[in-house]
Every structure is written in C-alpha cells, then in structure tokens.
Amino acid sequence: MREVQLIDKETGEVFYDKLTFIYLEMLKFRKGEDELVSQFDKWMYVLKNLHRLQDKPVKLQEKVFEKLFSEAEIAKLNPEDMKAYEESLKVYRDNYSVIETVRNDTKMEIAKELKKNGASVELIQKSTGLTKEQIEKL
C-alpha cells in the first residue's frame, strides 16, 4: 500500500493535507486465508481472490462480506438468468408494496374503529403503531 499526496514543487510543502491517494498493490499482498488478522487483510484478500473463490472462506463469515458475496453471485449471472432475476425482483417489490399498503390501510381502519369507540390515543398508538399525528387526522 502506498499513500501519495500532492506537493507544491516550489516549496515542497503538501498542497492539501486532507487529500491523500492510497494505492493498493494487490500483487504484493501474499497472505493466505489463515494469516488474515485485520479488516484490511480481509478486504485485500477478498479483492485479490474473489474471482477464484468457490466457497466463502471461514475468516470472511462476517455480515459485510456476506453482502459482498451475495452481490458477487448476482453479478456473475449470465444475461438470461440476470433478466429472470430482475423480473423476480420486480415482482417481489410489487408484492411487498401491495402488502405494505394493505397493512397500512388495515391499521388505519382499526384506528378509526378504536377512535369511534372512544379509545385513547395512547391505546390506539399501542394497538396500531400509528403516530399521534396520524391518529388525530382520522
């Protein structure tokens, strides 16, 4: 890894100390899976070896790497499978939206009924999860 900053040629002073370029020299990183200690080591290892990893290494069983491996699986889909994946994702999102709308409408109906029957705002909040402002607007 190399850190590089811009300097003023005339004075030799750092131009702006908040601007630093960090170059990762992947070829020089030679640690094996059993040698990974820091987060930096883990990231360097996964970036260098992702293209050849068949399974998730034991040392990379953290949430951040789970997301990375999940995205990598999607990225390597062939065009036909990618289209099918995107279609299924669209259907999932549409269904989720419909369910959330129904759920919200149901909460509002329950809140209206409770309010009509004299329930307190606090009880309606506990029963429906709606805010005080939402309940007062009913």
Image (cartoon, rainbow, N blue to C red):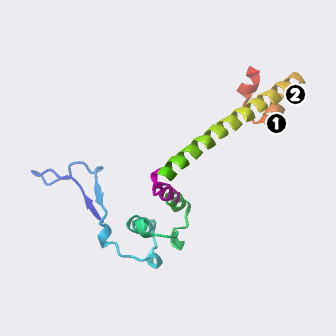
Dot 2 falls on a residue whose secondary structure is loop
Provide the residue designation for mark 2: 119
Mark 2 burial class by Cα count in 10 Å: few <14, some 14-19, many 20+:
few
Could you give the CA–CA distance between mark 2 and mark 1, rounded to whole angstroms? 10 Å
Dot 1 falls on a residue whose secondary structure is helix
Q: Which residue is depicted at the point 82% across and 31% down?
A: 124
Q: Residue furthest left?
A: 10
Q: Write the start and end of the magenta stretch as one range.
A: 70-79
Q: Is residue 41 visible?
A: no
Q: Residue furthest right?
A: 117
The N terminus lies in which quarter of the figure? bottom left
Please tell me whether residue 40 is drawn above or below residue 134 in the rendered image: below
How far from the left and from the top, in percent, is residue 93?
61, 40
Question: Which residue type does callout 1 highlight?
Answer: Ser
Whether 14 is among the magenta residues is no
How far from the left and from the top, in percent, is residue 24?
31, 63
How far from the left and from the top, in percent, is residue 130?
74, 32
In this view of the protein, which residue sits in the foreground, 22 or 88? 88
Question: Which residue type does callout 2 highlight?
Answer: Ala
Q: Verify CB contact (< 8 Å) between mark 2 and mark 1.
A: yes
Please tell me whether residue 84 is drawn above or below residue 1 in the rendered image: above
Q: Is residue 20 visible?
A: yes
Secondary structure that dominates the magenta span = helix
Mark 1 burial class by Cα count in 10 Å: few <14, some 14-19, many 20+:
few
Provide the residue designation for mark 1: 127
| Quadrant in the rendering for residue 105 | top right
Q: Which residue is depicted at the point 47% across and 58% down?
A: 72
The C terminus lies in which quarter of the figure? top right
Please tell me whether residue 37 is drawn above or below residue 10 in the rendered image: below
